[in-house]
C-alpha cells in the first residue's frame, strides 16, 4: 500500500522546479470570478535534502534537522518480516516485534520501561510486518537522551520477559478468534488468499496452534539471527544538531556488530494459478455484500507501471474523480465506498482490484458495473480531459509529499529499503509527463484481465449464490470457527 | 497498545467522502499554544501569539496561523451545527445535508443552472408527493385502489423522466474535481452530534480558488442527485452501523442511555428517516442553520494573513447571517436506575459501560479528562495494567470522557473486549472494582504528573500538521466559543487534585447512573441456499 502513496507523491514531483521566493499567495482584491476558469502559477518549492551517513557497522542513517517544534523522531526500518516465519510457527515475526516493545530490555524490566517512558511522555512503537519491521521513538527533544537509551535497549538487547511473552500470545490468539467479526476484514483476507494461495508468505495467517507453538526461545533466536545493524535504516528528524545526533547514534549503535541480514525474496504465484478465474462467497449475516474483484498484477518497477497506475487512477483510484465513483456511487447510489486499487510493491507480485460494499439486492448490478468499466478501459482511449485531470492532480498535489521532514526522510528510507534508486520518483514523474492515451489503453489491455478475475463476496448465503452465478461457477468458502 | 496521543474530545462523526476516510479521525489533541514550554519554544515566538483572529460583520470567525515552511495551506470550516439540531422524524438530515454540499452550486456542478433549476424544482415536488402516496398505500390493506395505484405509477413515470432530464445538466463531482486538479488533498467533510466540518489542503497560492468555491457553497448550494445520494447514505449506514458489531453496539447503547436528549440519536439517522428526507426539508434545515455566523474558518499554512482577510471579506463577507437559533433541546432527565441492553451479532463479545456526566464548561468535566487518562491512557494505565496484564481478563480496554458529543451533558464510557474464555460479566465486575478504587483511594501524585506531562507533549505533537492545528482551532472555537479554551482547559486539568478525582468518581460512578451495552455472540443458524454444503456449485 505504501507504494501507492509513493506513486502519488512521485508524480507530483513534476512541479518541483528551482528554489525561489514564492509568489504572493493570494490574489486578494481581484474579482474572483468562476472557479472553473481560474489559473495559477505552478508551485515552486525545493524541499530540504536529508543527509545520508553509513555507520561503520553498516547501519544507514538519514538525518534532517527541523527546529520548529521541540520534538525528535527516530524511525528504524528493519529487514525482518513474517516471510521468515517457519511454516509451523506462523506469527513468530509479529510476536517478536510485539514483545520487543513490551518485554523490557537494555537492563530495564518491562515495568521500568513502561513507567519511565510514559512518565516523560515518550513514545516507542515496534512492529514487524510481512516484508519489513519498524521501530520508532518520538520524544520531546529535552528527553531525547533517555528516550534513546530505552529505545536502544529494546532494539539491541530485548529481555523478552516471560509473562509479557505469554500475554502477547494470549492477545494474538484472541485476535485470531476475532478475525471473523467484521465482514470487511473477512473479505480482505480471503481475497488475498484466493490470489496468492493460503500458504504464500503474502497471504498466510497465523493460527491458534501456530501461535501456541511459539516459545520465548523462538523469539530470542529470531531477534538474534535476524536483526542486525546492517539490516537497518534509521531516519531521524526534528530538533537536534546533526553532529551531536551522529555522536549519540554512534554511542548507541556503533559497537553493535554486523551480522548476516536475511534475503527478502518472495516467490511468484505460478502463472497457471494466477490465470484461473474464480467466484467465491463467504456466508455472513450482513445487510451488505462486501466485494473484492481483481487479480495479481505487476510490480512497481515494471516498465508498464506508470501507464497502468494512471489507468487505474482514472478507473477507480482517484475517489471523486474516478469512473467507478461516478458510476456506482454518484449516478446509481449503490455504494458509499467504491474504488479500484493497484497495490504494487517490488518484493511480491502486485494486486489490482475493485471493491465496494452494497446492499445484497444490488450485488449483481455492482459487479456488472465493474465488468463494464473494465471493458471500457480496455476498449476505448481515455478522454483528453481525463488524462489532463489525472496529470494535473499529480503535478499540483506533489508538494504535499514534502509537507513534513519526516515525510521527506521516510520516503528516502523506503526507497533504499526496496532497493530502488534515489531518483525513482523522478523517473516515474518523467514517464507521467510524457504519458499518452494510447499507452494507457495498451497497458489496460495488457494488464487488466477480465478472464482472470477472482471474485470474492462476503454476505448473505441465501442470496449470494444466485447473484454471483452469472459470473462463473460459484463455490462457498467455509470459514472454520476460530478457537 | 492504545495510542497515547489521547484525544481530548472524540466526536463521533460521519464522513461524506470516500473509503479512504471511513474511520472518523479523532479531533482533539489538545494543542499547545503557549504553556510552560517557554524554554523549548525559545527559538520561536509563543505560538499563542501566532493565532490571528478576525471576525466579519456577518458573524463569521476566521482564525489563522502563518507557517511558511512549505507552500501549502490547510483549511477547516466548522459549523456549530450537527445532529443535535435535528427534529424528530428528520434524523440524519444534518449528515445528509453535508453530503448534498458536495453536489455543487449554481455555478459549479452544472452545465446550465437556469435550465436545470425548473427540473430540479419539479423533481422535488414530484418525488415528495410520490413518496407520500407510496407510504399511504403501504399502510393500506390490499395496497390501495386501482385508481390510487395508477396515480402512483403515473408519478413514478414522471419522476423517472425528470431524473433523466436533470442528469443531462449534472457535471458529476465537479466541485471535488476542481480541487483535485489544483492539487487539493484531504477534501472531505464530517458530521457529528455537535459539529459539521469541511476540510481541504491546497497549494497555498490556490486560496482564491478555495474562497470562490467555499463562499459559493456556503451561500448557494444546489441539491443535485438528491434521491441517489439517499441511497449512498443508506449504504453508509449499513456499512458503519448495521453490519459493524461495534457500530451497532454503540448505536444501541447510546440510544438507551439518552431518552430525551438528541445525543441518543445516531448521527447518520434512523433508516426510515433517511429514506423519507425531502429536498424541501433539507433546504429549510440549510437555511436555518448554516449561515456564516455559525461558522469558524481556521487556516494554517503559508500565506499572509492580511491577504487572507481581504479575500475572505470579499467573498464570504457578502453572505447574510442565518437567523438566531430557536431550537429547543430536551434536557436529559436524571437516570433513575441501571439500564442494560444487548445486541446480538455474528461476532465475539464486547462491552460498553457509560455514566452520565456534565458537558463542556462544568468544572467536573476536567476531572473526567484526568480520570480518562488514568484509567486507559498507555500501558501503565489502571485498566490496562489490571484487566489486560495482571488479570488477563481483557483483550483490550479503553475509555472516552465525551461520548457522543462535547457541548451538552454527555457520557463517560469504558469499552472492553474479553479475552476468551473470560466473559463480559467478569470484565464488568473488574471494571467496577477499578472505579470503586477511584472512590476509595486517592490517585497518586505520580499518576497526576503523568497525565499533565502527556497532555503537554501531545499538545506539542498536535502542532506538527497544518490540518491538525486548523482542525483544533476551529473545533474549540465552535464548541467553546473561543479557541483559547484549549489553553484554559490545560491549566484546569493541571489543577485537578486527587480529592477531586475521588469526589467525582463517587458522585457519578453509581449503579443507577449507569448504562451497560453488551455485544452477544449470535449462534448463527446458517441459512445457506439449500444445495450448498461444502464447496458445491449451485
Image (cartoon, grey):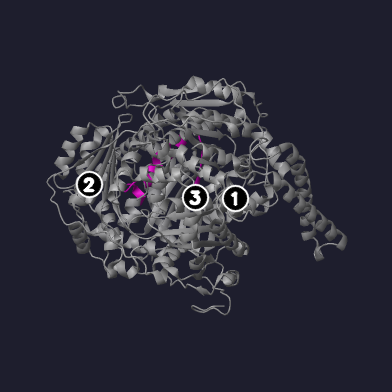
Where is mark 1, residue-wise?
A: A326
How crowded is the residue under tag 3: few (<14 C-alpha within 10 Å), some, or many (20+)? many
The disc placed on residue B457 is none
Where is mark 2, residue-wise?
A: A112
Q: Is residue B366 magenta?
A: yes
Q: Could you say where residue A318 lies in the image, as x and y percent from the top left?
A: 51, 48
The quadrant of the picture occupied by the C terminus of chain B is bottom right
Q: Secondary structure at mark 2?
A: helix
Magenta segment boundaries in residue numbering: B355-383
Is label 2 on the same chain as label 1?
Answer: yes
Q: Secondary structure at mark 1?
A: helix
Q: Say which label, 2 or 1, has the lower sequence index.
A: 2
Q: Which residue is painted at 27% across and 69% down in the image? A: A213
Which chain does tag 1 point to? A
Q: Nearer the viewer, mark 1 or mark 3?
A: 3
Where is mark 3, residue-wise?
A: A313
Tell whether label 3 touches label 1 (CB within 8 Å). no
Q: Secondary structure at mark 3?
A: helix
Q: Real-space Cα distance between discs 2 and 1?
A: 54 Å
B492 left or right of A476? Answer: left
Q: Could you say where residue A240 lies in the image, as x and y percent from the top left?
A: 24, 32
In depth, the one of A232 and B529 nearer the eye is A232
Q: Could you say where residue A411 lies in the image, as x and y percent from the top left?
A: 33, 44
Which chain does tag 2 point to? A
Amino acid at each position: 500500500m505504501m507504494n501507492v502513496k509513493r506513486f502519488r507523491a512521485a508524480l507530483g514531483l513534476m512541479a518541483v522546479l528551482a528554489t525561489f521566493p514564492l509568489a504572493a499567495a493570494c490574489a486578494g482584491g481581484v474579482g474572483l470570478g468562476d472557479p472553473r476558469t481560474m489559473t495559477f502559477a505552478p508551485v515552486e518549492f525545493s524541499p530540504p535534502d536529508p543527509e545520508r551517513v553509513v555507520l561503520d557497522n553498516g547501519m544507514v542513517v538519514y538525518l534532517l534537522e527541523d527546529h520548529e517544534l521541540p520534538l525528535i523522531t527516530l524511525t528504524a526500518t528493519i529487514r525482518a518480516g513474517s516471510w521468515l516465519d517457519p511454516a509451523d510457527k506462523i506469527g513468530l515475526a509479529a510476536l517478536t516485534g510485539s514483545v520487543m516493545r513490551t518485554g523490557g530490555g537494555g537492563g530495564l524490566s518491562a515495568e521500568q520501561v513502561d513507567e519511565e517512558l510514559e512518565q516523560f511522555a515518550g513514545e516507542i512503537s515496534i512492529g514487524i510486518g510481512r516484508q519489513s519491521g519498524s521501530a520508532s521513538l518520538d520524544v520531546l527533544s529535552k528527553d531525547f537522551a533517555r528516550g534513546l537509551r530505552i529505545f536502544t535497549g529494546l532494539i539491541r538487547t530485548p529481555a523478552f520477559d516471560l509473562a509479557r511473552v505469554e500475554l502477547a500470545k494470549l492477545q494474538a490468539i484472541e485476535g485470531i478468534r476475532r478475525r471473523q467479526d467484521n465482514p470487511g476484514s473477512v473479505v480482505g483476507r480471503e481475497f488475498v488468499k484466493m490470489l496468492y494461495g493460503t500458504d504464500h508468505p503474502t497471504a498466510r495467517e497465523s493460527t491458534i496452534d501456530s501461535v501456541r507453538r511459539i516459545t520465548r526461545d523462538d523469539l530470542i533466536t529470531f531477534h538474534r539471527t535476524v536483526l542486525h545493524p546492517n539490516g537497518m535504516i534509521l531516519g531521524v528528524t526534528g530538533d537536534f544538531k546533526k553532529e551531536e545526533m551522529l555522536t549519540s547514534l554512534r554511542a548507541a549503535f556503533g559497537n553493535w556488530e554486523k551480522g548476516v541480514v536475511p534475503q527478502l525474496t518472495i516467490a511468484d504465484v505460478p502463472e497457471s494459478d494466477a490465470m484461473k478465474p474464480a467466484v467465491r462467497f463467504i456466508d455472513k449475516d450482513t445487510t451488505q455484500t462486501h466485494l473484492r474483484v481483481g487479480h495479481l498484477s505487476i510490480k512497481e518497477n515494471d516498465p508498464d507501471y506508470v501507464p497502468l497506475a494512471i489507468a487505474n487512477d482514472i478507473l477507480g483510484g482517484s475517489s471523486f474523480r474516478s469512473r467507478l465513483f461516478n458510476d456506482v456511487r454518484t449516478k446509481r447510489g449503490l455504494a458509499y465506498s467504491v474504488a479500484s486499487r493497484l497495490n504494487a510493491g517490488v518484493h511480491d507480485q502486485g494486486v489490482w482490484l475493485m471493491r465496494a460494499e452494497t446492499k445484497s439486492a444490488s450485488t449483481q448490478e455492482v459487479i456488472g458495473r465493474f465488468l463494464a468499466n473494465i471493458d471500457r478501459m480496455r476498449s476505448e482511449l481515455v478522454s483528453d480531459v481525463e488524462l489532463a485531470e489525472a496529470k494535473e492532480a499529480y503535478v499540483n498535489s506533489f508538494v504535499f509529499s514534502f509537507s513534513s521532514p519526516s515525510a521527506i526522510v521516510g520516503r528516502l528510507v523506503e526507497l533504499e529499503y526496496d532497493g530502488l534508486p534515489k531518483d525513482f520518483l523522478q523517473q516515474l514523474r518523467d514517464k507521467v509527463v510524457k504519458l499518452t492515451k494510447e499507452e494507457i489503453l495498451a497497458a489496460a489491455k495488457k494488464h487488466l484481465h477480465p478472464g482472470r478475475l477472482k471474485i470474492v463476496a462476503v454476505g448473505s448465503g441465501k442470496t449470494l449464490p444466485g447473484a454471483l452465478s452469472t459470473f462463473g461457477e460459484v463455490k462457498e468458502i467455509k470459514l472454520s470457527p476460530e478457537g | 497498545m492504545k495510542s497515547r496521543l489521547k484525544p481530548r474530545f472524540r466526536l463521533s462523526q460521519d464522513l461524506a467522502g470516500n473509503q479512504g476516510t471511513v474511520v472518523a479521525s479523532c479531533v482533539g489533541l489538545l494543542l499547545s499554544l503557549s504553556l510552560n514550554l517557554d524554554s523549548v519554544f525559545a527559538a520561536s515566538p509563543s505560538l499563542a501569539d501566532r493565532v490571528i483572529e478576525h471576525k466579519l460583520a456577518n458573524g463569521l470567525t476566521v482564525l489563522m496561523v502563518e507557517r511558511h515552511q512549505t507552500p501549502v495551506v490547510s483549511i477547516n470550516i466548522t459549523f456549530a451545527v450537527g445532529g443535535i439540531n435535528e427534529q424528530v422524524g428528520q434524523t440524519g438530515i444534518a449528515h445528509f445535508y453535508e453530503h448534498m454540499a458536495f453536489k455543487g452550486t449554481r455555478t459549479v456542478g452544472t452545465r446550465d443552472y437556469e435550465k436545470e433549476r425548473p427540473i430540479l424544482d419539479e423533481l422535488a415536488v414530484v418525488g415528495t408527493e410520490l413518496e407520500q402516496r407510496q407510504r399511504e398505500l403501504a399502510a393500506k390493506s390490499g395496497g390501495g385502489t386501482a385508481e390510487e395505484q395508477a396515480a402512483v405509477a403515473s408519478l413514478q413515470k414522471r419522476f423517472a423522466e425528470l431524473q433523466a432530464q436533470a442528469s443531462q445538466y449534472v457535471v458529476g463531482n465537479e466541485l471535488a474535481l476542481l480541487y483535485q486538479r489544483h492539487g487539493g488533498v484531504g477534501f472531505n467533510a464530517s458530521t457529528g452530534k455537535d459539529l459539521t466540518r469541511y476540510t481541504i489542503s491546497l497549494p497555498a497560492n490556490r486560496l482564491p480558488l478555495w474562497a470562490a468555491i467555499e463562499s459559493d457553497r456556503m451561500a448557494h448550494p444546489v441539491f443535485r442527485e438528491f434521491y441517489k445520494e439517499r441511497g449512498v447514505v443508506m449504504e453508509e449506514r449499513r456499512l458503519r452501523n448495521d453490519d459493524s458489531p461495534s457500530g451497532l453496539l454503540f448505536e444501541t447503547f447510546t440510544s438507551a442511555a439518552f431518552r430525551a436528549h438528541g445525543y441518543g440519536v445516531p448521527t447518520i439517522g434512523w433508516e426510515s428517516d433517511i429514506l423519507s428526507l425531502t429536498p424541501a426539508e433539507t433546504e429549510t434545515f440549510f437555511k436555518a442553520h448554516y449561515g456564516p455566523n455559525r461558522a469558524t474558518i481556521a487556516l494554517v499554512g503559508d500565506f499572509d494573513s492580511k491577504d487572507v482577510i481581504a479575500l475572505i471579506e470579499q467573498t464570504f463577507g457578502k453572505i447574510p447571517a442565518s437567523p438566531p437559533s430557536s431550537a429547543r433541546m430536551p434536557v436529559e432527565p436524571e437516570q433513575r436506575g441501571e439500564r442494560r441492553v444487548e445486541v446480538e451479532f455474528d461476532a465475539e463479545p464486547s462491552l460498553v459501560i457509560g455514566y452520565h456526566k456534565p458537558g463542556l464548561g462544568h468544572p467536573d468535566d476536567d476531572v473526567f479528562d484526568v480520570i480518562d487518562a488514568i484509567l486507559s491512557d498507555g500501558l501503565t494505565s489502571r485498566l490496562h495494567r489490571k484487566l489486560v496484564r495482571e488479570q488477563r481478563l481483557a483483550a483490550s480496554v479503553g475509555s472516552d470522557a465525551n461520548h457522543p458529543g462535547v457541548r451538552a451533558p454527555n457520557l463517560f464510557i469504558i469499552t472492553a473486549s474479553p479475552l476468551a474464555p473470560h466473559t463480559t460479566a467478569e470484565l464488568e465486575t473488574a471494571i467496577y472494582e477499578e472505579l470503586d478504587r477511584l472512590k476509595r483511594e486517592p490517585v497518586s501524585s505520580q499518576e497526576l504528573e503523568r497525565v499533565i506531562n502527556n497532555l503537554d507533549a501531545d499538545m506539542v505533537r498536535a502542532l506538527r500538521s497544518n490540518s491538525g492545528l486548523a482542525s483544533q482551532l476551529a473545533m474549540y472555537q465552535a464548541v467553546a466559543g473561543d479557541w483559547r479554551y484549549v489553553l484554559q482547559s490545560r491549566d484546569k486539568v493541571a489543577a485537578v487534585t486527587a480529592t477531586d478525582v475521588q469526589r467525582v468518581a463517587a458522585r457519578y460512578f453509581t449503579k443507577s447512573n449507569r448504562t451497560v451495552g453488551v455485544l452477544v455472540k449470535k449462534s448463527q443458524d446458517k441459512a445457506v441456499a439449500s444445495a450448498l454444503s461444502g464447496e458445491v456449485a449451485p
